[in-house]
Image (spheres, rainbow, N blue to C red):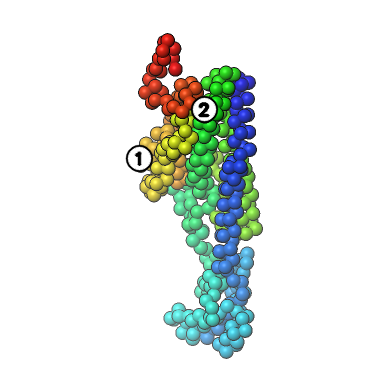
Amino acid sequence: MSKLWLVAEYEYKRQVLRKRFIWALLSVPLMVALLIGIIYLAMSLENDYTPIGYVDHSGMLADPIPAPDRSKPVEIRAYPGESEARKALDAGEIQGYYVLPADYVETNHVELVYLKRPKSNATGQFYDFMQVNWLATQPPEVAHRIAAMSDDDIIVRTPDGKREFKSEPTLGQLLPLLTGMAFLMLLGFSGGYLVQAVVEEKENRTMEIMATSASPGQLIGGKVIGLIGVTLTQVVVWSLFIAAAAFVGGRFFEVPFLQDARVDVQSFLILLAAFLPGYIMYAAFMTALGATFAEAQEAQQVSGLFILPNVVPMWLTGMIIENPNNPIAVAMTLFPLTAPTTLSLRVTFEQVPLWQAAVSVALLALSAWGAVWLAGRAFRLGMLRYGKRVDLRELFGRPKRAAGGSHV
């Protein structure tokens, strides 16, 4: 058992200390930071907190009710006439001004005068201000509540009440989907590491030395455990950075998408139970692939075929969103090669029945066990074959006998 952990430690250090791993580790934090920066810049360019004015010829705003409170309000200034408002506009004191004609109450017609179109945050707050004053006959708290409502206050719930979404999705709502995408990224990164490592060990005969001191099962198990450690390192670093980015972006930059990062415990446990055996299964397949092929480049080209099934559910995202319980989605949930990403999509938009999740996880666990067995067999057949492939008939059938009757 100690040899198993020695192999795992060797594999972990070998991968983590590579420059390619460090760049891959930093890639997600850099992308998240860039995304938050772009969102913040876009919001900054979209908002302008310079006051906005109005001229009331209708008398409706003779004794106006203030607009609803905002975290960053735009001052709304009243002007007695259009000449005064125009002077303020030309002097840059206001973004623009509204003119309410004498028949405004009957026609609901209003004019907006500006040199440069006012930003949406200013026009939106003036709209709220007008709403409050249209509701002047209602109690002030009712008027303010109605005016403060927006599309963000509309919540859509599933019939069973277990899922709810606002008009604009938040990080917490899309977290399972983003986790599935991260799973695909991890497969791409780590799969390449493992395939290349095994083929290189065959080429430089490191495998021959290792095989004299550890069994194929210990070598395979150690490599898979080491790779899981590498993956956990990536996941922990990425999770910590994303959590910090969500806190800073939501609290200080007031990015709406990052202001709700709640995690649904049941969905998290389902994904964890599926991703762990799913990752072991794919890691074992990659190890078997590396042991089967003679050249790293050839093996890496074929490795994409193993990851492709997990991409298929992403292609069918629209169908799954429309009906998460349709037969195709259920079938992909139960099929081990597509189960991890399909589950991440379905739990984002629907409460997956527990029996389906349990069967899916059980099939993934059996597949992981089978993949580890297959990797061990490929490793035994291929560890001393330099420059040669392992035939698939040998991998799934009986090994060929060499001269003298010994197995190869």
Looking at the picture, how far across and down is residue 142, in whole percent? 55, 66
Looking at the picture, how far across and down is residue 396, in whole percent? 39, 22
Quadrant where the N terminus sits is top right
Which residue type does callout 1 highlight?
A: Ile
Label 1: element kind = helix
Cα distance, mark 1 to mark 2? 41 Å
Looking at the picture, how far across and down is residue 211, in whole percent? 55, 20
In this view of the protein, which residue sits in the foreground, 376 or 354?
Answer: 376
Sequence order check: which comes first, mark 1 or mark 2?
A: 2
* 18 with respect to 391 (left or right): right
Which residue type does callout 2 highlight?
A: Lys
Quadrant where the C terminus sits is top left
Q: Residue furthest top?
A: 404
Q: Which residue is mark 1?
A: 328
When the figure is inspected, residue 361 is found, relative to residue 408, above or below; the finding is below
Label 2: element kind = helix
Q: Which residue is mark 2?
A: 202
Quadrant location of residue 145?
bottom right
When the figure is inspected, residue 62 is found, relative to residue 215, above or below; the finding is below
* 382 with respect to 88 (left or right): left
Pair 1/2: label in front:
2
